[in-house]
Image: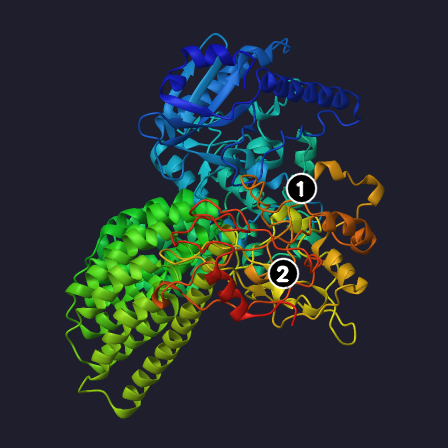
């Protein structure tokens, strides 16, 4: 930007009405201009030291940007050109800025430079022609700068040719022969306007004076040296001042020798310069003669030209015959044999199909043609488009086609050409230029050919747009096609639906697209459209959720009234795909009933009916398999739940108390010894799903353990049965049995020296054996003798005397293995017992028998409601110990000494 850019932004009307894009840093333009002036001074110094006076190297222009860049600022001569947008109309323009501070280092000629720049701006404001650069905002001059605005341009021709490599091949420039031909013709039309209507001679035509706009058109500019044909002073001496900027002086390399040597100025001088431009664009940007801003060198080259030598013979050999013939009629020593601006377009060099196509497509020509000729031209244009360069198609042909889209009648012929060119556009180019022009067409339903053409190009829209842009700007085209009244448009719109499922999100498919298709399915009376909607449903099944399928799609299919085979088979495909996705309950209750109903269609053939049956069998087999598995799973879960609830209550299914979790994980349990098989020593495998893991404990090594479970309600308690498969046979004094019992019960032997007999009073003697039934050895769970009966078993001297003799024999037994005499309950009526009493068993660990000469002592009478051994109240009266009835009952049942 300029050094005083802040002054420009605050005071300029351009800043008030326009938004300036990407301005350069303050002072950069002034520095660039000063660099240009410095190069001019260096050229002047070299010219002064050169043997040939006035011969100096031309100052190279500032580096120009690549064509097509409309945002980054670039330079044309002393002007800095930036892009701007109107704040109200959003029209894009190019703002030309010159900062006066750049001339501070220029000692002489400052006012002369400013006068040339002012003339360039004012000349553009007075001229209006399609081939002359169009001024949008007039010149504004302040104390620090000069500004004006023109149509958007992307480069000058000199800036384009500056990227040419030394061999004549353009590097990074896409200027083909057609574009050059079209550009030369446009400049010729501009010169014709100047000569015939404006009565002006350009007098300084060169690549710097030709500007390229955003559409690729060549425009005539740099009108700072124009001379009026009606002026009396039409010729000025072409003096070159190396201290002045080259852009404000005449270009000696493009100067007509007739003007410089013969002092004659005619309109033919501009045609000579145009011939030199045509030569330069074909041969790497070099003109035919390099005069080095010297009249002496120009005179020498004029003599060569008089002999028929045009530039380098080697370079001319590379050109075509038509081009060489044209150059020979433009680059001449005199103007007598030179072509005019009016006769130039008729030369064979411009006679080809591509140039004729571009000329016909020109706005001034195309708008005057009738519709029939326009339609014929647009149909043929699609065939010749590959002959044009990509740059020409994008910047010249495509903008012209987009401008003609205002006529709906031409759309069926315009759109194929537009989409053909759009295939080579980038996403940014398509979204910036093409898509905004196409969007208004999405709502047009008549004629239907427009909608059909747009729908056929849907893959291009998917490729060139993002998902968000497609959903917001392209999907209205699909929705409008589904709402159309033309069946052809409806079918074409439905045909595109499957390709959209990977582009749209699930919400847009379920909430909008599915609804649109369903509405069309309901209201259409066209068989082909009905089938297409079913095909759309089939493609949507993979996206729709189960709720939408069962609650929306299934009821929708149930409303089908027609029995046409095509509709039935399309419906079968939908049900078949849906039956794989939905639950078995929905298949059994919703899908299969409809399939059975549709299979009865009277118009189906045998093969079609067979397909229905195959699908029904497949879905039925799926239901049978999955539901059977479901029932098995439910049964297993219920079994596990019941087992878990039993374990939570502290008992297993067989009534054996379960060990705690802590004891189990810490190595505790009923037996810490590893389970061994009875034969062979093989470990017994445990079943995690068994009823009781303790059933595998060997009977021979584990004593029976009584189970103290509460009796059922309203039943008389009976002594618990011993949990063992068969009565064990133990030797009374067997150490093996004692050891096994101790290991099985987890008991620990206590030395006799540590036994405190005072803490355990001598139990009273039991009543005679004939009056009670002994119990088997008990564990720590055996309840102790009630303290409320101290006189039940009085002390006996025989027991005391025998205790010492039997102490060693009983030392291996657990210290808590004490036998208590139970009290048999009175037999109750049969109806009050849940099950008969178990048979009595002999206790191998009972106390020694009483002395035969000692009379039995009468047992104390217990309180009502108590029984010995278990301390549990009962509701049945108990027989009294020592009574004749009780003695007789016990004696009749068994003899403990038998």
Among the 4 quarters of the image, the one containing residue 705: bottom right
- Residue 581 rendering spot, x and y as whole percentages: 38, 66
Mark 2 or mark 1, earlier in chain = 1
- Residue 66 rendering spot, x and y as whole percentages: 58, 39
Among the 4 quarters of the image, the one containing residue 728: bottom right
Q: Which residue is mark 2?
A: 776
Q: Horizontally, is 886 left or right of 139 in the view?
A: right
Q: Mark 1: few, some, or many residues within 10 Å (few <14, many ≥20)?
A: few
Q: Horizontally, is 13 left or right of 155 in the view?
A: left
Against 606, residue 468 (above or below) is above
Quadrant of image for the C terminus = bottom right
* Residue 591 in view, yes or no: yes
**Residue at the location (69% across, 63% down)?**
844
- Residue 149 rendering spot, x and y as whole percentages: 41, 25
* Residue 374 in view, yes or no: no
Colouring: rainbow
Quadrant of image for the N terminus = top right
Q: Horizontally, is 897 left or right of 709 in the view?
A: right
Secondary structure of the residue carrying numbered label 1: helix
The Cα–Cα distance between marks 2 and 1, rounded to whole angstroms, is 147 Å
**Residue at the location (69% across, 45% down)?**
165
Q: Which mark is residue 843?
A: none
Q: Which residue is mark 1?
A: 303
Q: Horizontally, is 717 left or right of 548 in the view?
A: right
- Residue 860 rendering spot, x and y as whole percentages: 53, 46
Against 261, residue 460 (above or below) is below
Q: In the depicted view, which residue is nearer to us: 657 or 783? A: 783
Secondary structure of the residue carrying numbered label 2: loop
């Amino acid at each position: 930007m300029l050094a005083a850019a802040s002054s420009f932004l605050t005071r300029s009307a351009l800043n008030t009405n326009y938004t300036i894009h990407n301005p350069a840093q303050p002072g950069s333009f002034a520095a660039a201009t000063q660099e240009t002036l410095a190069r001019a001074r260096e050229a002047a110094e070299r010219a002064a030291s050169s043997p040939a006076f006035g011969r100096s190297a031309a100052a190279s222009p500032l580096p120009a940007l690549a064509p097509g860049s409309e945002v980054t600022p670039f330079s044309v001569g002393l002007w800095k050109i930036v892009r701007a947008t109107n704040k109200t109309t959003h029209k894009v323009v190019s703002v030309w800025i010159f900062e006066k501070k750049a001339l501070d280092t220029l000692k002489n000629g400052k006012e002369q430079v400013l006068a040339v720049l002012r003339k360039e701006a004012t000349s553009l404001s007075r001229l209006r022609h399609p081939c002359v650069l169009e001024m949008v905002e007039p010149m504004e001059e302040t104390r620090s700068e000069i500004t004006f605005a023109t149509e958007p341009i992307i480069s000058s021709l000199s800036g384009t040719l500056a990227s040419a490599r030394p061999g004549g091949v353009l590097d990074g420039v896409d200027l083909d022969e057609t574009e050059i031909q079209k550009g030369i013709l446009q400049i010729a039309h501009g010169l014709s306007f100047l000569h015939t209507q404006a009565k002006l001679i350009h007098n300084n035509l060169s690549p710097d004076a030709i500007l390229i706009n955003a559409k690729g058109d060549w425009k005539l500019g740099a009108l700072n040296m124009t001379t009026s044909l009606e002026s009396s002073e039409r010729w000025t001496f072409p003096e070159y001042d190396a201290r002045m900027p080259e852009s404000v002086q005449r270009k000696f390399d493009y100067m007509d020798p007739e003007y410089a040597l013969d002092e004659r100025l005619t309109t033919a001088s501009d045609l000579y310069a145009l011939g030199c431009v045509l030569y330069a664009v074909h041969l790497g940007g070099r003109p035919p003669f390099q005069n080095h801003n010297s009249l002496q060198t120009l005179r020498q080259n004029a003599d060569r030209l008089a002999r028929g030598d045009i530039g380098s013979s080697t370079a001319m050999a590379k050109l075509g015959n038509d081009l060489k013939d044209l150059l020979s009629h433009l680059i001449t020593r005199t103007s007598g044999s030179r072509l005019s601006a009016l006769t130039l377009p008729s030369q064979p060099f411009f006679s080809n199909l591509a140039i004729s196509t571009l000329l016909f497509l020109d706005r001034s020509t195309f708008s005057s043609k009738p519709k029939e000729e326009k339609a014929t031209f647009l149909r043929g244009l699609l065939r010749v488009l590959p002959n044009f360069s990509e740059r020409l198609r994008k910047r010249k042909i495509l903008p012209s086609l987009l401008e003609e889209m205002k006529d709906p009648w031409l759309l069926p012929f315009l759109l194929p050409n537009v989409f053909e060119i759009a295939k080579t556009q980038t996403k940014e180019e398509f979204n910036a230029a093409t898509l905004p022009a196409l969007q208004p067409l999405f709502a047009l339903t008549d004629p239907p050919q427009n909608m059909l053409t747009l729908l056929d190009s849907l893959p291009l829209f998917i490729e060139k747009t993002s998902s968000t842009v497609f959903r917001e700007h392209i999907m209205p085209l699909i929705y409008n096609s589904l709402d159309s009244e033309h069946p052809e448009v409806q079918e074409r719109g439905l045909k595109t639906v499957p390709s959209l499922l990977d582009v749209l999100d699930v919400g847009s498919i379920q909430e909008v697209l599915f609804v649109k298709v369903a509405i069309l399915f309901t209201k259409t009376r066209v068989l082909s459209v009905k089938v297409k909607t079913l095909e759309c449903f089939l493609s949507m099944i993979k996206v729709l959720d189960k709720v939408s399928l069962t609650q929306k799609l299934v009821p929708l299919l149930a409303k089908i009234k027609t029995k046409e085979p095509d509709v039935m088979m399309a419906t079968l495909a939908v049900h078949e795909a849906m039956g794989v996705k939905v639950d078995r309950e929905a298949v059994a209750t919703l899908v299969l009933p409809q399939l059975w109903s549709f299979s009865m269609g009277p118009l189906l053939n045998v093969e079609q009916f067979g397909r229905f049956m195959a699908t029904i069998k497949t879905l039925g087999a799926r239901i049978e398999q999955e539901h059977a598995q479901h029932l098995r799973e439910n049964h297993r879960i219920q079994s596990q739940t019941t087992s878990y609830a039993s374990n939570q209550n502290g008992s297993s299914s067989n009534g054996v108390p379960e060990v705690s979790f802590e004891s189990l994980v810490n190595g505790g349990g009923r037996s810490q010894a590893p389970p061994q098989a009875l034969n062979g020593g093989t470990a017994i495998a445990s079943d995690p799903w068994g009823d009781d893991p303790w059933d595998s404990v060997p009977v021979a090594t584990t004593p029976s353990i009584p189970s103290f479970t509460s009796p059922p309600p309203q039943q008389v308690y009976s002594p618990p049965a011993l949990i063992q498969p068969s009565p064990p046979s133990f030797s009374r004094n067997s150490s093996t049995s004692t050891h096994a019992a101790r290991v099985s019960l987890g008991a620990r032997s206590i030395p006799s020296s540590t036994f405190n007999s005072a803490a355990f009073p001598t139990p009273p003697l039991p009543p005679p054996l004939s009056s009670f039934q002994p119990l088997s050895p008990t564990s720590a769970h055996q309840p102790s003798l009630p303290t409320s009966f101290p006189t039940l078993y009085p002390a006996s001297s025989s027991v005391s005397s025998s205790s010492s003799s039997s102490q060693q024999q009983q030392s291996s037994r657990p210290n808590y293995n004490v036998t208590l005499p139970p009290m048999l309950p009175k037999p109750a009526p049969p109806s009050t017992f849940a099950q008969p009493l178990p048979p009595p068993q002999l206790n191998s660990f009972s106390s020694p028998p009483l002395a035969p000469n000692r009379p039995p002592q009468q047992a104390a009478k217990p309180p009502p409601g108590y029984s010995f051994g278990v301390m549990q109240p009962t509701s049945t009266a108990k027989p009294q110990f020592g009574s004749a009835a009780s003695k007789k009952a016990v004696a009749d049942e068994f003899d403990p000494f038998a």
